[in-house]
Image: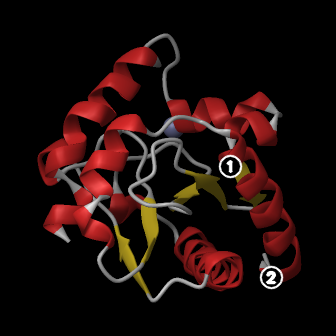
Amino acid sequence: MEQLFSPWRSQYISSFATEEKGSDCVFCSALASGDDEASLIVCRGCEAFVLMNRFPYNSGHLMVLPKRHTADFLSLTSAEHQEMMSLLGAAQRALQELSKPQAFNLGMNLGRVAGAGIDAHLHWHIVPRWNGDTNFLPILADVKVVSEDMAEQWKRLRELFRQLATV
Ligand SMILES: [Zn+2]
């Protein structure tokens, strides 16, 4: 968990946060943009939404977030919790269809000290895993950019969520 969710990525995430400094919150901006393909939103529910991570830990890395801007896990309503759990389930199914991972990491970093790159708007991570992938993940993390692959992946995930999400 620790290896996957924080240390070697912190520098990368910082550059992402700095780059987006103009807007108050990258997640709220994505939600407000109205262009789901450009913002990489694959599913919008009533209380929560699903976003592809622009700088993935691994191919297919998704995030599930409340629509409401909050850093406080304890402030989440039961409706928000329920919808996020439902979307995490749909995310696992969609990724299973998309790329047949062997396992998943599911987690949330609450606060910057815990490894959250963007700590003002809490988010679940769901990361598909394959045997041996940690050997090359740190290398990939330095070179990943938004690619045509990612646009293609967005299209497929969007369609899978249309079929699978029940919110
Ligand atoms: Zn926000």
Q: In this rendered view, identify the residue nearer to me: 102 or 91.
A: 102
Q: Secondary structure at mark 2?
A: helix
Where's residue 123, x and y in %? 44, 56
50 above or below 33? Answer: below
Instruction: Identify the mark at residue 59; answer none if there is no mark.
Output: none
> Is label 2's Cβ within 8 Å of ligand 1?
no
**Is residue 45 in view from this perspective?**
no
- Residue at position x 32%, y 23% in the image: 15
Picture quarter containing residue 82?
Answer: bottom right
Comparing marks 1 and 2, which lies closer to the viewer? 1
Task: Return the residue at label 1.
Answer: 149
Q: Position of residue 18 (x, y in %)?
A: 35, 17
Assign a secondary structure to mark 1: helix
Q: Residue at x 79, y 41 (%)?
A: 37
- Is residue 137 something one can see in this rendering? yes
Relative depth, front residue between 115 and 66: 115
Pinpoint residue 41: horizontal percent, then vertical percent. Answer: 71, 49
Q: Residue at x 47, y 19 (%)?
A: 20
Q: Amino acid at mark 1?
A: Asp
Residue 164, numbered circle: 2
Q: CA distance from mark 1 to mark 2?
A: 22 Å
Q: Position of residue 154 (x, y in %)?
A: 74, 54
Question: In the rendered view, does 55 fall on the left or right side of 37?
Answer: left
Image quadrant holding the C terminus, namely bottom right
Please name the residue shown 52% across and 17% down the image: 23
- Under mark 2, the amino acid is Leu
Q: Are marks 1 and 2 in contact (CB under 8 Å)?
A: no
Quick one: 132 or 56, which is closer to the camera?
132
